[in-house]
Amino acid sequence: MDIISLASSFPRHRDDPSGRFIADLNVGLVKRGHRLLQLAPEAEGAARREGLFPGYLVERFPFAVADWQRGIVYGDGIGANLKRNPALVSALSALHFGFQRALSEALIRHPQAAILSHWAIPAGWVAARANLRERRSHVSVLHGGGVQLLKVLPFGSRFLRTWAQGTDRCLCVSADLAEKTRAQLGPKTLPIRVQPMGIDLDRFRPRGRREETRRELGLGPETFFVLGVGRLVKLKGFDLLIRAAQDLGDVSVALAGEGPERVDLLSDAEASSLDLHLLGRLGPEKLRDIYEAADVLVVPSRLGPKGRSEGSPVVVPEAYAAGLPVIASRTGGLSEAVQDQRTGHLFPAEDVSSLREILLVLKDDLEMRQSMAKAAFQEARHWGYDAVAAAVEEELIAAIEQRS
C-alpha cells in the first residue's frame, strides 16, 4: 500500500524529539511492507527531501512568505507559539496552503495512495478536503485537543464539519479523547478507534549509566531524583511539581524540555531552595540516560480552557521502557496509561498536597519503587511501535474497503 502521511510536527534531525512517535510509526508501517511518503513543514537545518531507507521518503514543504513566520510550527507547538506571539496567526493560512499544495502534488505522483493525517489542525483538515475532492481513503489520528479547539474557534464548526465529512476512520490516542471527539461530532457517525501511539522501546532501555549520570548532575547516592519531561508550558503543570517537591529533604528535580515557563519555574525553585536542573531539550540517547538515573517520572498535567486535556503523552511509555515508575495527574489519557498502585500513582489534577504525599511515600519506600519499576518495564512491551503500526494498517485497509 502507498501511504501519504501528513504531520505538522516531525523530527528535523536524529536527536529531535518533535513528532518522534510519528517517525517510529512510519518505520513500523514500512516494515510491514508499505511505501510511505511523509509530508511536513520545512525547518531550518532539515533536508527538504530525504530517503530514510527504501520505501520511506520525507518531503518538507515551504509554506511562509517570511522566515520569521516559520516559527509557528516547531519549538513549543502551534498553540504556545501563537500565545507567545499572536502575530504568527498570519502564517496559519500560509501553512494550510503549503500543506494543500504539497498534498495535491503528492497525490498526482501517487494516484493509489491512502492518506494518514496526524492532528485535526491543520493536517487533518487539509487531508479531509483532499479526500472529499479526490475520493481517497483518509484515516485521521487525533493526539490532543484539536477537535475540541475547533468547536470554540471562529468558523471552527465549519472546519469540524469538513474534517468529519472527509475522514473515513479516526484513531484517538485515549478513550478520554475519543469520548470528547464523539461529543463534538454529535449525530455524525464516524468510526473511532482508541489507539495510543507507540515508541521504539530499544531507544530507551537502560544501558548501565545510572550512577555515572547521577554523578554528572551532582546527585548524592541517596538523593531522591524526580524527573519531568515535556514542553515548559502551563498545561504541563511543572509549577505544581516544584511546589510539591519543596522541603522534602534530599530531593532533586530535573526538567527536560524548553518553553515559555522556564524563567518562572526557575524563579519558583530558587524561592523555595529546591535543587532544580533545567536540562533543555534532550536527544534520545541523553534522555535515556536521564530516565535511567531518575527514581520517578512525574507528569502533573492540568486541564486547559474548556476542559481540554492532553491525549496520551509518550513520555509514559518512554519511562516504562527505562523501568521507571510514573506519577501522573488523573487527566485525559494519563488516567489510562498509568496503572494506579502498579506502574505508578495517579493524583487529582492540580492537587499539590496529594502529589506531595505520593512523593514522600515513594521517597521513603525503595521496595515500592522497585516493584513499580518492574511492573512498568513489563508494561512497556504493549507500547512498541510495531503494535501501533498493525492497528493503523487495519484502519487504512478498512478505510479503503469503505470506498470500494
Image (cartoon, helix red, strand yellow):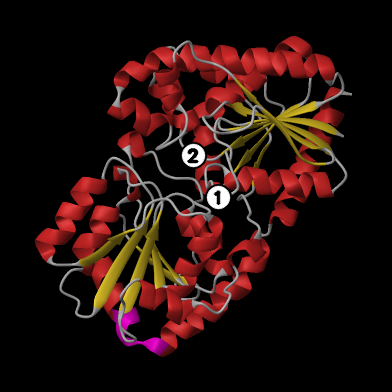
Say left or right for 325 vs 302: right
Location of residue 321 (image quadrant): bottom right
Say left or right for 294 vs 5: left
Residues in magenta?
Answer: 361-366
Lower position in the chain sequence, tag 2 or tag 1: 1
Q: Is residue 105 magenta?
A: no
* Residue closest to the eye, 138 or 43: 43
Q: Position of residue 402 (x, y in %)?
A: 82, 27
The residue identified by callout 1 is 15
Judged from the image, the secondary structure of the residue bearing numbered disc 2 is loop
* Residue closest to the eye, 400 or 386: 386
Alpha-carbon neighbours of circle 2 within 10 Å: few (<14), some, or many (≥20)?
many
Could you tell me which residue is drawn at 33 percent across and 44 percent down? 235
Location of residue 252 (image quadrant): bottom left
The residue identified by callout 2 is 144
Q: Is the residue 283 above or below the residue 366 in the image?
A: above
In the rendered image, is residue 350 in sight?
A: no
Could you tell me which residue is drawn at 66 percent across and 58 percent down? 200
Q: Position of residue 213 (x, y in %)?
A: 43, 74
Alpha-carbon neighbours of circle 1 within 10 Å: few (<14), some, or many (≥20)?
some
| Quadrant (top left/top right/bottom left/bottom right) for the C terminus | top right
Q: Is the residue 302 above or below the residue 291 in the image?
A: above
| Quadrant (top left/top right/bottom left/bottom right) for the N terminus | top right
Say left or right for 213 vs 208: left
Label 1 amino acid?
Answer: Asp
